[in-house]
Image (spheres, rainbow, N blue to C red):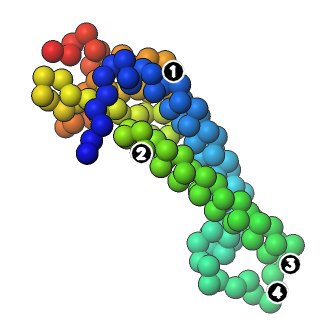
Amino acid sequence: MTRYYTIDSANAAVPELEGIVRVLGEQRAELVRLRDQVLAGGGGSGEGAQKAVGDRGARPDATADPQLVDDLRLTRLRMQGLIDQMAAGVARIDALGLTLRDIEHWLVDFPALVSGRQIWLCLQRGETTIGFWHGHEDGFAGRRPLAELV
């Protein structure tokens, strides 16, 4: 069953949500940094990245530098740890009944009911309170100020 937020209950959830999304953003940035590091270490061919993060069955060839192989394995483990932590953060947001649209821009939608119509109350980076909403079909491009909510 969907939990619907009022403006007040959505605003009350913002501090907890900000903490979760801030950490997700940091984790995402670190994951991207590690991915880029792996790609650079693989000579840009993607082979290093495949061995580090994608193909669990891939075995380094006998001529590979053992230090490079160990570094790639450690990086792969760090990346998987970040992915697991991020999944837990997203699960916390989901448990609040919210929809995370974009980690980098902190786009989050709160389900709400207005005059029997389902809408989204929305929040993005830099906003400390709910000030906008949009219809289910409109998406972020259809964001409108709460003052226009009828």
Reply above or below: 84 against 1: below
2 and 110: which is toward the camera: 2
The nearer-to-camera label among 1 and 3 is 1
Q: Residue at x 54, y 51 (%)?
A: 88
Q: Quadrant of the N terminus?
A: top left
Please, what is the three-letter code of the amino acid marked with disc 2?
Asp
Side of 92 relative to 9 (left or right): right
Are there few (<14), some (14-19), or many (20+) residues within 10 Å of tag 3? few
Q: CA distance from mark 1 to mark 2?
A: 21 Å
The nearer-to-camera label among 1 and 4 is 1
Q: Secondary structure at mark 3?
A: helix
The mark that comes first in sequence, 1 or 4, is: 4
Image spot of residue 37 (x, y percent): 72, 57
The image quadrant of residue 96 is top left
Please, what is the three-letter code of the amino acid marked with disc 3?
Pro
Q: Secondary structure at mark 1?
A: loop
Reply above or below: 83 against 50: above
Q: Are marks 4 and 2 in contact (CB under 8 Å)?
A: no
Disc 3 marks which residue?
Answer: 66
Q: Secondary structure at mark 4?
A: loop
Q: CA distance from mark 4 to mark 3?
A: 9 Å
Disc 4 marks which residue?
Answer: 63
The image quadrant of residue 42 is bottom right
Q: Residue at x 28, y 15 (%)?
A: 146
The nearer-to-camera label among 2 and 3 is 2
Disc 1 marks which residue?
Answer: 126
